[in-house]
Image: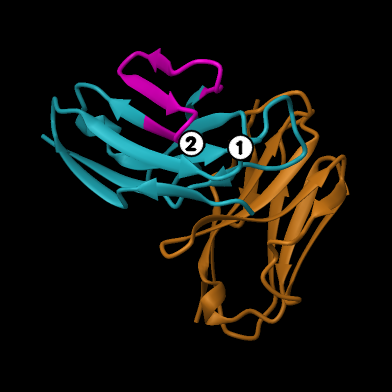
Amino acid sequence: DAGVIQSPRHEVTEMGQEVTLRCKPISGHDYLFWYRQTMMRGLELLIYFNNNVPIDDSGMPEDRFSAKMPNASFSTLKIQPSEPRDSAVYFCASKRNSGNTIYFGEGSWLTVV
Amino acid sequence: QQQVKQSPQSLIVQKGGISIINCAYENTAFDYFPWYQQFPGKGPALLIAIRPDVSEKKEGRFTISFNKSAKQFSLHIMDSQPGDSATYFCAAGLSGGGADGLTFGKGTHLIIQP
C-alpha cells in the first residue's frame, strides 16, 4: 500500500489567500479524517467522512473551512480566506469500516503570513 | 469531543531508563485505547493498543497499563533508546470500527539522551 498521500507537503501563503489541501486515502478504506496539529491544541479532529459522506464537521473551526470528498479516492480541505492563526500541520487519515487503526498521511505544513 | 488528558507535556530520559507517559479519559463508553508515535516531519503511527478487558499489554519494550476504575492508562518504555525520541499521543475511542474518530491527548515530546 502507498499509504495516505497528501499534497502539498509545505505551503506558504499570504493572509487572505485561498488554500487547498489534498488527500488520497488508502484504497479500500471507508473513513477519511482531517486533523489539525498545533503545539497549543495538539491533534484536533476537524471533520470525517464515511463512504464519501461527511458525518461530523463539528470540529471545523469556522465557515472559512470547508471539506469535500467527491469520490472514494480523493478529498480536499479548503481555507478561504486564510489567516495567520490557521498556520498548522494538517493531517489526512483513513481507516476501514471494520478496523480500529487510523492511518495518517505525512501532513501538509501550512504557514500563513 | 470528550477529553483525553495526557501528561507530561515533555519528558527527558537517560538512555536505558524507563519512560512513563500517563493519560486519563472521561467517557466510560470508550473501549479502545491506542498509543501513536510521531517522528519529526511524519504523521502519527499506531504503536500499541489495549482493550479494557486486560490490565496490561506488552509488545517488546513497550507496555500499556490500564486502570479501568480510575479511567487511566499509561505507556511504559523500558530500556529507552535514542531512537525512541518522538512525540507520543494517547487516544481513546470506540472499537469495532465505530463511526467516530479517536480523541487524542495533546502529546508528549520524549527525548532520550545518549
Residue A4 found in image quarter: top right
State the SS at label 2: loop
Relative to A37, residue B71 above or below: above
Give the chain ID for the cyan colour.
B
Per the rendered image, the range of residues in magenta is: B50-74
Tell which subunit mark 1 falls on.
B
The outermost residue toward the front is B69
Q: How far across and how far down the image is residue B104, in percent?
A: 53, 46
Mark nearer the N terminus (2 vs 1): 1
Q: Amino acid at mark 1?
A: Thr
Quadrant in the picture for the N terminus of chain A: top right
Pointer 2 and pointer 1 on the same chain = yes
Q: How far across and how far down the image is residue B110, in percent?
A: 27, 43
Please name the residue that numbered disc 1 is placed on: B28
Mark 2, other Cα within 10 Å: few <14 / some 14–19 / many ≥20: some
State the SS at label 1: loop
Relative to A29, residue A98 above or below: above
* Chain A shade in the render: orange
Q: Amino acid at mark 2?
A: Lys
Residue B71: assigned label: 2
Residues at marks 2 and 1 touching, judged by CB atoms closer than 8 Å: yes
